[in-house]
Image: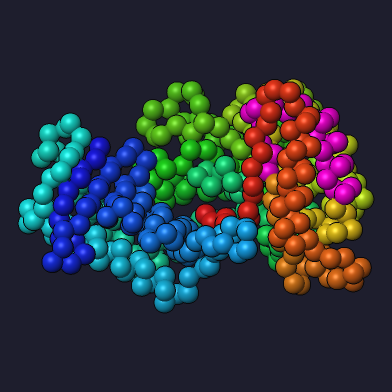
Amino acid sequence: MFFEIKAPLLSPEKEDLIFINLKKQAISISINIQTAYTFDLKGRLFTAFIDGHTYRRSMDNRVMEIWSAKIGDLKHRNRLWLSAGKKKALLDKIHTETARLQNLLSNGNFQVLSHSPEPLSWIQISVEEAIQKILYYDYERLEADAQKFRAIYQPVGILPPDMYLALVVQVTESCSYNQCNFCYFYKGQPYRVKSLSEFQTHVQKIKEYFGEALALRKHIFMGEANALDLPTEQLQDYFEILQKEFPIGNNGHSDLPAFDGIYSFMSAFHKKLKTVKEFAQLHELGLKRIYIGMETGSNELLRFLNKPSSVERVIQVVNHAKEGNVHVGIIILLGAGGDKFYQPHVQQTVEAIKHMALDKYDFIYLSPMVSLPGTAYHEKVHAENIHPLSPEQIEQQKSELIKGIESNFQENMPKIALYDINQFIY
């Protein structure tokens, strides 16, 4: 349902083109095309677009600014977490403009240009209700809401790019291994598994917190890292709680928006790998895709990264999952091992993927290596005088990997996409 008007929103001297769209999953307001705000159905800001810059707000009320700029021949995406002062200024600005819009609608100081076919009076009431929800969340209430979120969740370390709109449920906290020398997502966080009763309470609190805003979430992501490494018999109990509490696929619920399935990270380094039968059992309970940080097809490079797995075990897990009707997302690190491992990384990764039964329902993510000072990887690279790849070399390696991977498939090729972890926000 949409509502397009002209009204003097930004200044009394000039009329602005305002487009209000009430969707099943979100509320959006655009002003003069250059500005657009999206809110969840509870009225909390989700994203803003202003003069070519995107602002994404997290559930714990942080704001990331993203914009593009050209450096030489390469287009570079810049990102910056706003300071507390700039964040407040942005959120206050959006709240003020929404309050002005409410006044214009209340006073009838606008000209209707177009609207959906429903009766106009019904649309105005719905629009005003939506704006009331947005106005409820001023800066102070967004900060208070963030505290509620943090009381329910441990930090959400990372998600795959296609899961940024997932509803995260945390069966586990942190990572059971947590020793990959390049990873910083869970440093200092102890690993633990929630009991069934604790998880049930966790899910109830999530439902209460999101409420009608669940409509914005398309998938359920079982976190945190490697949650699926738990024994299958144990996992089934957690899956059954999710099936009971949420409409997943066609399981009979009708009171909540439906989720298309359950997704999760998985490793390949546990002694007992899941069998085809186990994957099939979890698929019956809603498991749709697993994500594996393969990183590389080179066992030597895996050892360099302090990954306790092997390429052969990753291939086995992938093929077991596929045979059990579970889709797969493979994550490859661009630039891993720098110049020392450039060629074996490309050649052996392409070769490993050749032995995986991947198809068009799967993903291969190419994720640029992030080497942070203070990580064991950063120190090791410098100690061994290994040169990190330049942005141009990263692009070249990406092209070589894509070309090699594509040569493995005559048809039904998996989707290949970039995975920039710096853009993650939940």
* Residue 359 part of the magenta segment: yes
Q: Is residue 271 above or below residue 250?
A: below
Q: Is residue 215 above or below residue 202?
A: above
Drawn side of residue 355 relative to residue 234, left or right: right
* Residue 306 part of the magenta segment: no
Highlighted range, magenta? 343-365
Toward the viewer: 164 or 288? 164
Residue at 52% from the left image edge and 54% from the top image edge: 426
Residue at 87% from the left image edge and 41% from the top image edge: 348
Q: Is residue 52 above or below residue 120?
A: below
Measured from the top left, where is residue 189 in percent x and y? 68, 62
Measured from the top left, where is residue 407 in percent x and y? 78, 31
Residue 352 can be seen in this image: yes
Measured from the top left, where is residue 301 in percent x and y? 88, 52
Residue at 92% from the left image edge and 50% from the top image edge: 300
Q: Quarter holding the N terminus?
A: top left
Drawn side of residue 409 relative to residue 203, left or right: right
Residue 273 can be seen in this image: no
Toward the viewer: 43 or 281? 43
Measured from the top left, where is residue 373 in percent x and y? 74, 72
Drawn side of residue 356 relative to residue 54, left or right: right
